[in-house]
Image: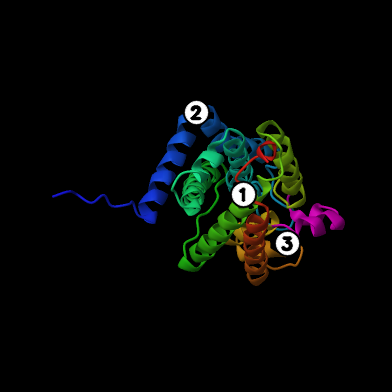
Amino acid sequence: MERTLREPSVVSLCAARAGVELRQFFRERTAVIFTFALPVVLLVLLGSIFDQQIAGSGIPASQLLVAGMIAAGIGSTCFVNLATSITSDREDGTLKRLRGVPMPPIAYFAGKIVLVLVTAAAEVAIVLAVGMAFYDLPLPSDATRWATFTWILLLGVIGCALLGTAMSSVPRSVRAAAPIVNLPFLILQFVSGIFIVPLTTLPQPLQQIGALFPLKWMAQGFRSVFLPDSAAAMEPAGAWEHGRIALVLGAWCLGGVILCLTTFRWQGRKDG
């Protein structure tokens, strides 16, 4: 009897593509080291500069930096790295070839999602370990704070990944991708209170610009998880605003989906 060949399921194709993405990433040792080391290096440098307690709060500025660098690490892995890698896939013809094979498009995106989830989780773990070891960052002891951490992490990863995917259609080449993607992200880190603590020390117009984007709300959410409730007084609104954090991050997730559906291209501009 002849055996009937069964077509692979969508799940198996997604898993296979995820394995390819992970192997490709971790084989590039330079990229791996840079991805995971950059937030740690910035944290150590800034932590050595802002090594005093914030006046009237009794909270070390370095602990605010740790919470902010968790958000920055997620933004770096899910927005910057994803936008650059998809641009590279488009330029070297990977997207065009994948589009021409009998593989559902969702498999490619599922592979990227798994990649950013793994790298973001590793980034967060490394930053937390450094914060605990060098800056006495306290870990939450109740489940409510860990639940808050989880939904902020998931919404942040999803939103940044969608925006990174949409942003990948902007650069004309992989050489142009790095400055085009990194410049706005660098600016956002300053106006979102990642490098400047507390956020209220920034001029009001810059605070308002930062409040339009998810990075500021991710950093504020993570501060609410790892810092005492008294630290909420240092936020612009004087509160953690969990409802607004969820609303803004959710809106960016929805907006990211719309941008991806309307702007994503499988071929480069030179391919027509």
Earlier residue among tags 2 and 3: 2
The residue carrying mark 2 is 29
Residue count near mark 2 (Cα–Cα under 10 Å), binned few <14, some 14–19, many ≥20: few
Circle number at residue 235: 3
Secondary structure found at label 3:
loop
Residue 233 seen anywhere in this rendered image of the structure: yes
Is 225 in the magenta? no
Residue 236 vertical position relative to residue 62 in the rendered view, above or below: below
Left or right: 201, with 133 as reference point: right
Numbered disc in front, either 1 or 3: 1
Secondary structure found at label 2:
helix
Circle number at residue 262: none
10 or 216, nearer to the observer:
10
Label 3 is placed on what type of residue?
Glu
Total marks shown come to 3
Measuring from the top left, give residue 94's x and y in whole percent. 53, 37
Q: Which residues are magenta?
A: 196-213
Measuring from the top left, give residue 35's x and y in whole percent. 57, 36
33 or 232, nearer to the observer:
33
Label 1 is placed on what type of residue?
Thr
Label 2 is placed on what type of residue?
Arg
Dividing the picture into quarters, in which one does residue 95 lie? top right
Measuring from the top left, give residue 44's x and y in whole percent. 62, 37
Earlier residue among tags 1 and 3: 1
Which residue sits at x=51%, y=61%? 150
Dividing the picture into quarters, in which one does residue 135 lie? top right
How far apart in space, not on screen, are marks 1 and 2 (Cα)? Answer: 23 Å
Measuring from the top left, give residue 7's x and y in whole percent. 32, 52
Q: Residue furthest top?
A: 30
The residue carrying mark 1 is 165
Secondary structure found at label 1:
helix
